Structures are given as C-alpha cells and as structure tokens.
Image (cartoon, rainbow, N blue to C red):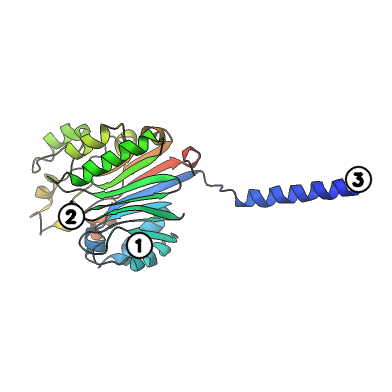
Amino acid sequence: MKTGLLALFSSAVLTLALCAENVSTESSIKIVNWNVLYGFNHGQALEAGSRWIAEQAPDIVALQELNGLSVEQLGHHARSWDHAHAVMHKESGFPVGLTSNRPVEVLERVVKGGHHGYLHCKTRGVHFFVVHFWPGQFFEPDRVTETSRLLLSRKERIIILGDFNGCSRRDAHFLKTHATGRMPDFSFVDQVESLGFVDMIHKHDPLAKVSCPSPITIPRWSRDLAELKTKQYRIDFVFADPQLAQGSESGTLLLEPVINTISDHYPVVVVFNAASWPD
C-alpha cells in the first residue's frame, strides 16, 4: 500500500514539474510601434530595420507603411526578431501590420470607407488596433473608438497604436514654441482619450515630444536641419485602456542615430508588467 502511494505521489510531483516547465517565466511584455517609411526607407533598409527590431527583443511589433511587402515577406523578416506570427491588413497602398511571439487572431481588416484603413487583431488576450490615420478623414478613428467603446463595456483589454497624423493637447506648449512650421490637429487623440485611454509615452516620459520627422527627409521635405526642427512633433502613439495602463512600466520614443537612415519616424517602445496582462 505504501509503495502504491509513493508511486502515486512521485507521479504527481513529476506532473507538476512538467507543468511548471510550460509556465512562462517572462516578467515583462515589450511593444514596439514604428512607421517604417515606405517599407523601411523604400526597401533600402529592410535588413537594418530588422536588425534594430531584433536588438530590442520585443514581444509585439506594430508597423505602418509596409509598402512593397507581402505578408509572407513580413513573416520572413519577423522571424529574424523571433516572431513566428505576422499579419497585415492589406498588401497594397500603405499597409499596417502586427507581429508577435504568440498566436495572432485577426478580427478585422478595414480597407474601405476611409483612407489607409486599419488592422484589428488580438494577441496575448489583448485587442490591438494598428492605425495610420489621415488628417480630415474620420471614418477610421470613429470606427475604432466605436468598437473600443463596445469592447470596454465587455471588460476587454485594448491597445490602440500607430501613426495618428495628429497631436496631443499634452504637447500644446511644445507645439506652440517649437513646431512652428506645423498646424496641430488634436481631434484623433481627443477621441481616443475621451474613452479613458492612457498615452503611454506621456505617462512615463512626458518630455518626449518628437516622433518625426528624422533627418532622412532632408532635402526632400525640409531644406536643412534648422527648417526640419520647426516641423518636428509627436504623432506616433501607444494608448492603453485604463486597467491595462496600470501595469505599464515604461514608455518612450527612441531617437537613436541609426533610425535616421531607416525611417522618418522614431519608434515608440512601451513595456508592461506581464503579470498585469490577461494572457
């Protein structure tokens, strides 16, 4: 009888040990959001951009302006940063996409009725809206906020991220004193914040005010660095719903010199405590 109980106990211990091996030991979840300028500088910086992303060791990557890339090509490059899952909302025009080291469920690919369109998917138990809004076009932000309102009522967790082509009122003083070559539009950010979404950059790094353009745009869109500085502002965002935002650990814009050869936008990097996520 004792031998039987000992064998049963040993079996239970072994089962628990095997289960423990399958439990994730990660302590954080890192997200990179980046507009990559016509498919990483018109395809010229695909390898450099992929290396930079790989160096960040992200768990989730949201990209805008994947021009010229197919979903198969995105998947190929995503594997270089250890992401086995890659999706896009379209393969023409100005696509947006998302890659993850966990499975991704595509819920909506919105390509008609607006401008660039957007991607709505789910990974790690969180809804992601990858957006590339356009000034004066409200179909996409209206639909994103309408869907988000419904999801919030169901206690779902949500992140809205991408290139907003619009500014935050939290940057108003900077815009007035520095970005004198721009006319700011707050409407898109206002819509998202009206639902209680939290600006991850402002929460953790309120002095970060520039997400574009980088010097790569000289001389095509600015004559020189002096003119460029009058046009620099923050239009790239990661917004998290209020509950998810409580578990955020950091958020900033990375103005690294290497980015100046890859894109006109600087990446947004946000880190969350993994224990605060639903999956």
Is the residue under label 1 in contact with that under label 2 (CB below 8 Å)? no
Q: Identify which amino acid the numbered label 1 is placed on.
A: Ser
Q: Identify which amino acid the numbered label 3 is placed on.
A: Lys
Please state which of the two labelled residues, at mark 1 or mark 3, is closer to the viewer.
3
Q: Which residue is mark 3?
A: 2
> Disc 2 on helix, strand or loop?
helix
Q: Which residue is mark 1?
A: 50
Residue 215 disc label? 2
Q: Residues within 10 Å of mark 3 (few under 14, many from 20)?
A: few
Please state which of the two labelled residues, at mark 2 or mark 1, is closer to the viewer.
1
* Left or right position of 194 against 227: right
Q: Earlier in the sequence, mark 2 or mark 1?
A: 1
Q: Earlier in the sequence, mark 3 or mark 2?
A: 3
Is the residue under label 3 in contact with that under label 1 (CB below 8 Å)? no
| Residue 4 in the image, given as x and y percentages of width and height | 88, 49
Residue 184 disc label? none
Residue found at x 71% / y 50%: 15
